[in-house]
Image (spheres, helix red, strand yellow):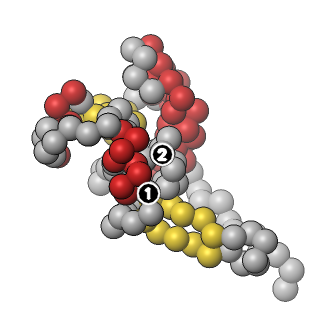
Amino acid sequence: MVAAADSLVWELVKNNNSFMRKKNGRTARSGSIRFSVERGNVMSRSTYKYSGLANSKTIDIAATDDNRAVLTVKTKKASTSGKSGKAGIALNKDFRRTEKTIKSQATDNYYRPDLKSAALAKYTTVYRSNRVAKGVKKAVPVKKGRA
């Protein structure tokens, strides 16, 4: 794969790619929202800042099959190799230690400090859903509204 500038890659993929999901708003005022489901996109939004395709440095947090979490970052060889260009870090300690790991991977080595809060928010939701899946905590019931 040929190395290209991040901004050039974003200009090529921002309007059309296979990972884009467009959701129309309920009213004309709310407009439509563009989501993206590619790996490396920590917020699942189709923007340059969060794009896993266009950025050479990405952070992603995902749940595994055994109800744990994994932190994935792109490595130096990611631009020339496909799937082998990612490093996974298991997040299987308690919440505070895992939070420290996420912060250190994002900010301490100057990787992507702008994604620190987004990565922590994503880990919080993954952690909460894993606790429900393990049966440690009960699911929060959905409020029905007026009937």
Q: Is residue 22 left or right of residue 89?
A: right
Residue placed at 54% from the left, 29% from the top? 114
Looking at numbered disc 1 in the image, what kind of residue is underneath it? Lys
The residue wearing badge 2 is: 48
Give the CA distance from mark 2 to mark 1.
8 Å
Residue 25, image x and y in percent?
68, 74
Nearer to me, 101 or 32: 32
Q: Residues within 10 Å of mark 1 (few under 14, many from 20)?
A: some
Nearer to me, 95 or 109: 109
Q: Is residue 115 left or right of residue 140?
A: left
Q: Is residue 48 left or right of residue 52?
A: right
Looking at numbered disc 2 in the image, what kind of residue is underneath it? Tyr
Residue placed at 14% from the left, 38% from the top? 80
Residue placed at 62% from the left, 75% from the top? 24
Residue 23, image x and y in percent?
57, 72
Q: Is residue 42 left or right of residue 92?
A: right
Residue 122, image x and y in percent?
52, 44
Residue 1, image x and y in percent?
13, 45
Q: Between disc 2 and disc 1, whose residue precedes?
A: 1
Name the residue furthest top.
108
The residue wearing badge 1 is: 14
Image: 56 above or below 46: above
